Amino acid sequence: MDSVKTAKPAAGPIRRETLHHGVVAELRTMILSGELRPGSRVPEIQLCGHLGVSRTPLREALRILAAEGLVELRPHRGAVVTPIDPNEIAAVFEVMEALEALAGELACRRGTEEEFAELDRLHARLHAQFDAGDRLAYFMTNRQIHAWIVAMARNPSLEATYSGFASKILRARSLANYDADRWRDSLMEHDGFMAALRRRDAATAGRLLADHCCHTTAAVLNALNGSEDSLQNSARGRLPP
């Protein structure tokens, strides 16, 4: 990001009672939308003015985002948006593909009716966000859906491993569906594995979740290996996920 706009005139400073979560959410959105680009320094002074906060809550928020893998706290340089290494991302996605498949199979066997109802609710929200063209909201709901399926598997080791790898590819995954056709295909893939989950068809659900992860990998790597202009245009969020 070359510059950050001054404080938002309509919203004003973030209220004290929501300061902590508000600053984290704002910065996360700026990173996932590409306004703060991979490898760029986080301009703390400008962001304090933009968000209407002091240095202390901003740095607390940066520590949380560092734990999520979105920023790196570097000595003598401050916070830097985590660079994305295509080779590392490809390797992590290989593992995620297997984890997604296992999670889908176990969720079919162990999920409760109440949990499947919540999954349906999240899926309906995903469709609504697609129809509204709300890319960032779609991305966050998409994360919730996959995390919910993993939780339904009721395997603490699987959940811990998945969570660790998911944080490594959070920033990269936000690049996957900038292309409108890929976004539409991704939603259709969700429809497919959701139908298998509802039928409690463990083998099919696992396979479709793995396929979905594989397609996401290809989209991410295409975005990472594209031209700088292509990445910047995509990151401006003109086309939904």
Image: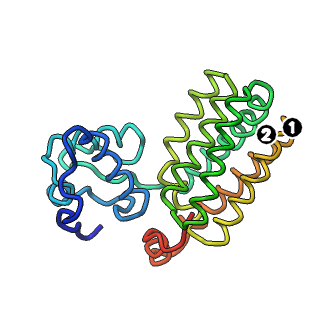
Residue visible at 76% across and 28% down in the picture: 106
Residue 9 placement, left or right of 159: left
Q: Report if residue 85 is visible in the image.
A: no
Q: Quadrant of the C terminus?
A: bottom right
Q: Secondary structure at mark 1?
A: loop
Q: Quadrant of the N terminus?
A: bottom left
Instruction: Place residue 154 in its image quadrant.
Output: top right
User: What number is the disc on residue 201?
Assistant: 1
Q: In the depicted view, which residue is nearer to us: 29 or 40?
A: 29
Q: Is residue 43 above or below residue 157?
A: below
Q: In the depicted view, which residue is nearer to us: 160 or 145?
A: 145
Instruction: Place residue 24 in its image quadrant.
Output: top left
Q: Position of residue 121 (x, y in %)?
A: 64, 44
Question: In the current view of this chain or complex, which residue is farthest to the bottom?
Answer: 229
Q: Report if residue 45 is visible in the image.
A: yes
Residue visible at 55% across and 68% down in the picture: 178
- Asked if the residue at tag 1 contacts the one at tag 2, i.e. Cβ–Cβ closer than 8 Å, the answer is yes
Residue visible at 62% across and 43% down in the picture: 145
Q: Position of residue 211 (x, y in %)?
A: 76, 51
Q: Please, what is the three-letter code of the amino acid marked with disc 1?
A: Asp
Q: Is residue 177 above or below residue 53?
A: below
Q: Residues within 10 Å of mark 2 (few under 14, many from 20)?
A: many
Residue visible at 66% across and 67% down in the picture: 182
Q: Secondary structure at mark 2?
A: helix
Q: CA distance from mark 2 to mark 1?
A: 6 Å
User: What number is the disc on residue 223?
Assistant: none
Q: Please, what is the three-letter code of the amino acid marked with disc 2?
A: Leu
Q: Position of residue 107 (x, y in %)?
A: 74, 31
Q: Is residue 169 above or below residue 159?
A: below
Instruction: State the residue position of label 2.
Output: 197
Q: Position of residue 135 (x, y in %)?
A: 52, 62
Residue 205 placement, left or right of 124: right
